[in-house]
Image (tube, grey):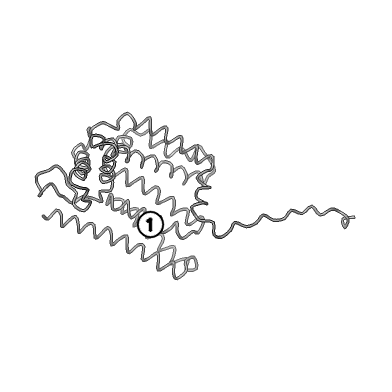
């Protein structure tokens, strides 16, 4: 009798067109309810933790380097946004020009002064650092949640950081350390996702973010060295995982990152020698 049963087969769903841009796939992932809920959680927590102190001038521990970083921003604003010649308010160098680690934070804070006024540069500066800390917590959530499926476990690392007084103090300051550390969390996320999904672009993106973190704070270069070493060892032990072209791109990306870090080091040495 089975010959007379009606045909109830369902046509297969059409495959996703290959031309769908990667950004659309990322947007789909970002729209997941758990990701959105975690983003709201960290944004609210960050606003409560960092909001009351945005307009506070540098104080507390390491007040001198905090003040120097703020001076970089105000002097970028006052002296025409010359990124390659950062200035502090010290008179020990010519015009206050000095070599510093990649000053992207103070430069962005100075640009924020164009929108909100010079008097609000400190608030923009602290908001940038706080925003980076919140972003880092969210990527920590994604690292854990996408591997465990547990929403509570995913929230735990970021919640711990946002309730640690020492981390809160430094993450809301003008220092480069927490900013660059937050970028390493982003880099680790895409590095791990490369091993999960085999998207080579994720690996290159991770190395680029870790290079930027290393430029902002030299000690974060330890993360770049660790990731690069493990990746190269993996490519050696699993030669079929990377095509010859991908191997060239990997080595070129690493070489470019090292060249940027070394080049900026010598640029700073030249500034400090004047």
Q: Which residue is mark 1?
A: 207
User: Is 271 drawn above or below residue 109 in the view shown?
Assistant: below
Kindly state the secondary structure of the residue where label 1 is placed. helix
Residue 152 screen position, x and y as percent? 50, 37
Q: Residue at x 25, y 36 (%)?
A: 117
Q: Residue at x 12, y 43 (%)?
A: 90
Residue 78 screen position, x and y as percent? 18, 43
In depth, the one of 174 and 112 nearer the eye is: 112
Q: Residue at x 44, y 66 (%)?
A: 246
Q: Is residue 125 left or right of residue 7?
A: left
Q: How many numbered discs, if any?
A: 1
Residue 244 screen position, x and y as percent? 45, 71
Q: Residue at x 9, y 44 (%)?
A: 91
In depth, the one of 199 and 158 nearer the eye is: 199
Q: Residues within 10 Å of mark 1 (few under 14, many from 20)?
A: many
User: Is 272 drawn above or below residue 50 in the view shown?
Assistant: below
User: Is 207 drawn above or below residue 110 in the view shown?
Assistant: below
Q: Quadrant of residue 208?
A: bottom left
Q: Is residue 70 left or right of residue 35?
A: left
Q: Quadrant of the N terminus?
A: bottom right
Residue 48 screen position, x and y as percent? 38, 30
Residue closest to the far right: 1
Residue closest to the far bottom: 244
Q: Is residue 2 left or right of residue 57?
A: right
In depth, the one of 106 and 35 nearer the eye is: 106
Q: Is residue 190 left or right of residue 49?
A: right
Q: Quadrant of the C terminus?
A: bottom left
């Amino acid at each position: 009798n089975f010959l007379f049963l009606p045909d109830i087969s369902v046509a297969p769903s059409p495959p996703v067109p290959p031309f769908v841009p990667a950004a659309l796939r990322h947007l789909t992932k970002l729209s997941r309810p758990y990701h959105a809920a975690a983003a709201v959680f960290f944004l609210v927590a960050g606003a409560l933790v960092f909001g009351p102190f945005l307009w506070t001038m540098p104080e507390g521990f390491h007040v001198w380097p905090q003040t120097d970083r703020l001076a970089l921003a105000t002097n970028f604003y006052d002296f025409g946004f010359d990124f390659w010649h950062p200035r502090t308010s010290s008179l020990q160098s010519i015009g206050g020009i000095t070599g510093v680690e990649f000053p992207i934070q103070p430069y962005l804070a100075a640009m924020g002064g164009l929108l909100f006024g010079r008097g609000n540069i400190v608030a923009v500066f602290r908001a940038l650092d706080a925003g980076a800390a919140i972003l880092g917590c969210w990527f920590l959530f994604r690292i854990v949640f996408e591997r465990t499926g547990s929403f509570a476990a995913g929230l735990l690392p970021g919640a711990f950081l946002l309730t640690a007084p020492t981390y809160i103090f430094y993450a809301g300051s003008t220092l480069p350390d927490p900013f660059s550390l937050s970028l390493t969390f982003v880099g680790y996320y895409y590095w791990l996702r490369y091993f999960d999904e085999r998207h080579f672009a994720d690996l290159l993106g991770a190395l680029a973010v870790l290079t930027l973190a290393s430029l902002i704070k030299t000690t974060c270069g330890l993360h770049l060295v660790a990731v690069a070493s493990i990746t190269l060892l993996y490519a050696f032990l699993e030669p079929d995982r990377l095509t010859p072209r991908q191997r060239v791109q990997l080595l070129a990306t690493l070489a470019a990152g090292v060249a940027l870090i070394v080049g900026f080091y010598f640029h700073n040495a030249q500034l400090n020698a004047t």
